[in-house]
Image (tube, rainbow, N blue to C red):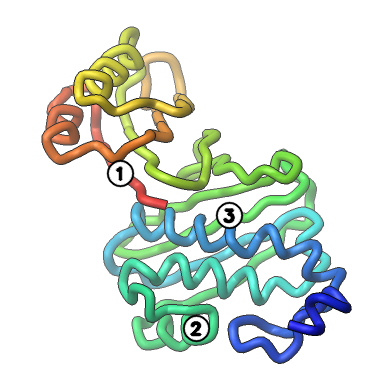
Amino acid sequence: IRAVLLEGTIRNAVNMPNLDAKTLAIIGPHLRFGEKLGKFLSQIAPKRADSLNINYSGKVNDVDTTAITRAALKGFLQLAGGSEVNEVNAPAFAETLGLKVSESRLSAPGDYTDMLELSAVGEGKTVSVGGAFFGATPRIVSINSRPVEARPHGVVLVLENTDRPGMVGRIGTLLGDHGVNIATMSLSRNQVGGSALTVLNLDTAPDEELLSEIRASEDIHSAQVIQL
């Protein structure tokens, strides 16, 4: 604690590697964000994941990202291990599950100056979620390589639907009829009339009755509630 207050460093902490002030200033905001992204990914990933990769791009590439990787892994494993999973035991927990964890780095500049993208592979399927900072504000900016913008907290409803006129209104009406308010909404489509990804931050979680109504629509192919 003394080192953190007087020197801005973390040394010999049980829950993360030693970090100097410069490194901590860069990765500090990414620790909680990485955990959130890991938690998000775990809820869209196959039940049996074989591998988890954390891809880094931007200024975070200049520092040791071990602490961020552990935070992301902790978030990813909490669904299976609950509160017992932490930054210290997450790598060992992953090993017992047969989960291979890796890091990669993108040297070429992308659309964002600082970005994390987590991807999981399992059961013949790959899923991913990407996050970036808008100034000091973290945002989810991609889901399965589709561009979106969503807040990484609270209740997130992810829909795969047909791109059809009136869909936004129908979804809004369904939620409103059940007293569920939309905080933000993001739409991403591959082409006109094709497949669309609709991501909504909600003030409250939809109940099973509402989810059943949403999924009953022939234009909605899947509906997932993510709790962050």
Q: Which residue sits at x=31%, y=15%?
A: 167
Tell me: residue 47, above or below residue 178: below
Name the residue that disc number 2 marks.
91
- N-term-proximal mark, 2 vs 1: 2
Residue 129 rendering spot, x and y as whole percentages? 50, 50
Of circles 3 and 2, the one toward us is 2
Name the residue that disc number 1 marks.
225
Tell me: residue 168, above or below residue 75: above
Residue 200 occupies which quadrant of the picture?
A: top left
With 8 as the anchor, is 216 left or right in this view? left
Badge count: 3
Residue 191 rendering spot, x and y as whole percentages? 45, 20
Q: Residue furthest bottom?
A: 12
Amino acid under disc 2: Pro
Tell me: residue 181, above or below residue 63: above
User: How far is mark 1 from mark 3, CA to CA?
Assistant: 20 Å
Name the residue that disc number 3 marks.
117
Residue 75 seen in the figure: yes
User: How far is mark 2 from mark 1, CA to CA?
Assistant: 27 Å
